[in-house]
Image (cartoon, helix red, strand yellow):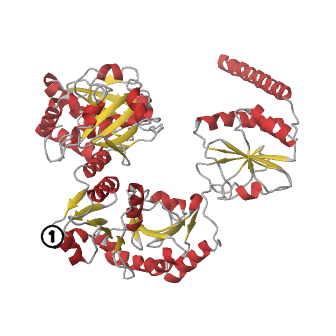
Amino acid sequence: MKRSDLVFLLLVSLLCCACGVEEDAVMGEDSESVPSEGGVGVGREDVGDVELPLLNDDNFLRAVKNVDFMVVEFYTPWCHHCASMLTVLGELSGDLQAEGVSFARVDIEQSKELKARYQINAVPDIRILRRGVASPYTGPSESDGKQALIDYFLEEAAIPLEEGPIELTVANFDSIVKATPIILVEFYAEWCVHCQQLEPHFHAAARRLRYSDPPVLLGQVQIPDQMEVAKRYGVEGYPLLIVFRYGREYNYTGPREEEGIVSYMKKQAGPPSQLLSSVAETKAFARSNTEIRAIGFFSKSTNPELLERYMETGNRVRMDMELGHTTDEAVAKEMGFKTNTIVVFHPRNYVSSFEEGHSVIKTIPTNQDVLMKQLMSHSRPLVGHMTEDNQLSVYHDRPLLVGYMDLSWDLHAKTIRYWHNIIASVAKDYTPASKKQLIFAIADEQEFPTDIKLLGLSDWGEDIAVGIFGKDGVRFALTEELTSESLKEFIDDFLGKGLRPKLNSEPTPKSNKGSAIKKVVGNTFEKFMGDKSKNRLIKLCMPDAPQCKKAGEYFPKVVARYEGMDEVVFGEMNMALNDVPPSVKLDGILPTFLFARKGSKDIIQVAPKPTDDADLVFFLKVRHSIRPTLSERDIALRSKYKKNKEGKKEKKSDKKKSKKDEL
């Protein structure tokens, strides 16, 4: 294979040919390792002319912690793209070894801990490690050629290590943080798994942001070494991220992966509000098809504290809207607004014929928290645009009605406006003044597949899927074609409490007969717990939660002690796939046991939380006089008898097998 071909394969693999990896993905029994074009068998130990060191869970940290620059490929033996890439890296290793660039490989099928730590979900996956700190490969594109690869690795290796996050301590924290325009600080502990997962992204973002315009610094505070600093900011969980502007702290509400951190912090840098000096500039700023814009109209005689409060609030809302301000009274007059007011201009794409397109805060609150809430509430047009970024700030109120569709404006502008107008024509009758307030929005279906699934509308065949999210997590789906009439009826039924909420549910079991522990799903919960002819006890769990695994061991022991008793029935429900009705209040801590006494429809939560079978038996026996049919001794003897019987059967089977082998 030619070198140019190898480079092309590497680039294609990096950019668009990654193989998907499942947790237990294996080759079929009849599958074979197929040689690549150059004769390199998949999973072959030697690569090109140079053999790449094989790292694993046991030797990885020792191998990378003292190396300034190492390129590591995470691969699987059955992945053909991985084999081709290993060949290319082997060739590059020979060219760059003398330049201080090291190469290695990790078989993720043999190194499960490394796979989990670095979140390897697809192979091949290339990571750059600098003294144990990993960052993703962000190298040349497919058209750049081999020399570009060499130049990239050499340039990356030449960047000093200290250009990652700044190490903050009790001694330097105040001097650095209070003198820096903006810095993102991570409070972390080395043993924390989530901190380990964030580490490569945080370090990579730190290197990129240091050279952004304006530069943004990232720093780290290690716990428990710098516990004095952590206590000052009430750090209880890790990792905790806080944004500081000249020492003043702000909550970090952004993503926790490299690209998201970089994007978020670039938006956080710079002044919170743009100074607008003319009428033309102000009008241009106010007009945006997609962005929310707020303008503070002040005068030169305005109290400086009022403007400062506006600017400070701007730092807290800058991810949700862009802020501007003017101190020219002539600009306010020409625009038709009074001074010392704030006007929030809504995105033109989402303004209907039923509204003005802006909202005015006539009196600026003295409390910054109140001002922030007002900015958020005034930023919503009649039917706004909910996104992943603003759903927790602008669209967190309930009840909320959302229409999910394809919001590709360049392709479907006419269709989007049609559905938006239908929703707006109904929404105008449910404003705060009507005392029947709902929040209305449309959202891109590609951003919210989980919401659509929760509404049970994943297979909905129409252009738009509509649902209402109420308080306490309840949700309701419109299951008719969207029209003004069907939407109004849907909302009125919701407000009149005539709708049945949509619950997550597994398929209803065909039969539970003969099962000591009945499988209960969302659709059968009310039937199971509503059977007043028996005492009912149900376990609610998430299968992978540690405490739920423990409950899965002791719950059957409780059930065994009540064997043959018709007056009590036991059930269990997987809370990862099913919901309980909204009328059932849970404390959110799993496992949860719910009990309903014979003859009563009231459901109570078993408290205090059981920790073993003895606690549950005590609850049934002492508190509700439901005595078990078998004692612990009976259960132990039965278990011993069963084991002895199975042991004899196994010995008998071994003897038969031995005789067969002799023959």
Q: Position of residue 133 (x, y in %)?
A: 30, 29
Q: Residue at x 37, y 26 (%)?
A: 226
Quarter holding the N terminus is top left
| Residue 263, placed above or below residue 398 | above
User: Farthest top residue?
Assistant: 662
Does 602 appear above or below 131? below
Residue 450 lies left or right of residue 142; in this view the side is right
Question: Is residue 130 or residue 29 the one in the foreground?
Answer: 130
Count residues near mark 1 (Cα–Cα under 10 Å), then give few for <14, some for 14-19, many for 20+: some
Q: In this image, 353 relative to 655: left or right?
A: left
Q: Does dot 1 land on a helix, a strand or a loop?
A: loop
Q: Quadrant of residue 655?
A: top right
422 or 182: nearer the eye?
Answer: 182
Q: How many marks?
A: 1
Q: Which residue is mark 1?
A: 278
Left or right placement of residue 326 versus residue 228 in this view: left
Residue 82 location (% of width, % of height): 31, 37
Residue 338 against residue 239 in the figure, above or below:
below
Say which amino acid is labelled 1. Ser
Residue 104 is at least partly visible in this image: yes
Is residue 127 left or right of 639 when viewed as pictured?
left
Q: Residue at x 28, y 75 (%)?
A: 337
643 is higher (above) or lower (below) than 115 = above
Residue 34 in view in this figure: no
Residue 268: % across, % down: 28, 50
